[in-house]
Amino acid sequence: MKVSDVLRNKGSEVVTIKPDETVSSLLDLLTEHRIGAVVVSTDGSSVDGIVSERDVVSHLHGTGPSVLDVPVSQIMTSEVTTGTVDDNIADLAGTMTELRVRHVPIVDADGRLAAIVSIGDIVKHRLSELQSERDQLRDYISS
């Protein structure tokens, strides 16, 4: 199975934030969209970084509440692991586990942002596959 199979069900909408937006604005986006990470992008199609709720908590612990007023660029991860729609889901899940990341931006052949996949999206897709296989086996045995 490929990332494109996950995106077929999930969709390719990506929420982005500009690097100069505040962490407080980031929290508004995370809450509004009920998501755990946002791609940082100056133009909505480049991947300049990624910032997650985990980043906010870590910096909040280290810096205190003043972190809410700093630009997202100060707390984002700049070296972002990306994937493509042709990547194997199992390989991507292995990479995510190894690197301890929960969100991977998906880019097209030109390196432009196309989607984002979370480990939850991968697990949901795999559970759906297993359910389908189980149903097919049950139908086969019953007939």
Image: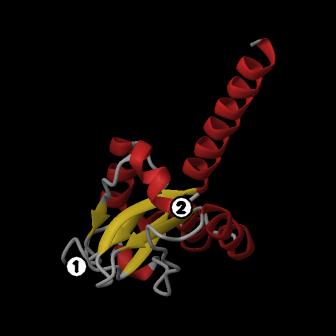
Any part of residue 69 in sight: no
Residue for point 22% across, 79% down: 42
Residue type at mark 2 is Lys
Residue located beneath label 1 in the image: 42
- 131 or 47: nearer the eye? 131
Tell me residue 137's x, y (percent). Answer: 76, 27
Residue for point 39% across, 54% down: 27
Residue located beneath label 2 in the image: 2
Q: Mark 1 near mark 2, Cβ–Cβ under 8 Å?
A: no
Residue 50 against residue 12 in the figure, above or below: below
Residue type at mark 1 is Thr
Label 1: which secondary element = loop
Which residue ends up furthest to the front in the rendered image? 143
Tell me residue 31's x, y (percent). Answer: 39, 44
Dot 2 surroundings within 10 Å: few (below 14), some, or many (20 or more)? some
Dividing the picture into quadrants, the one containing residue 72 is bottom left
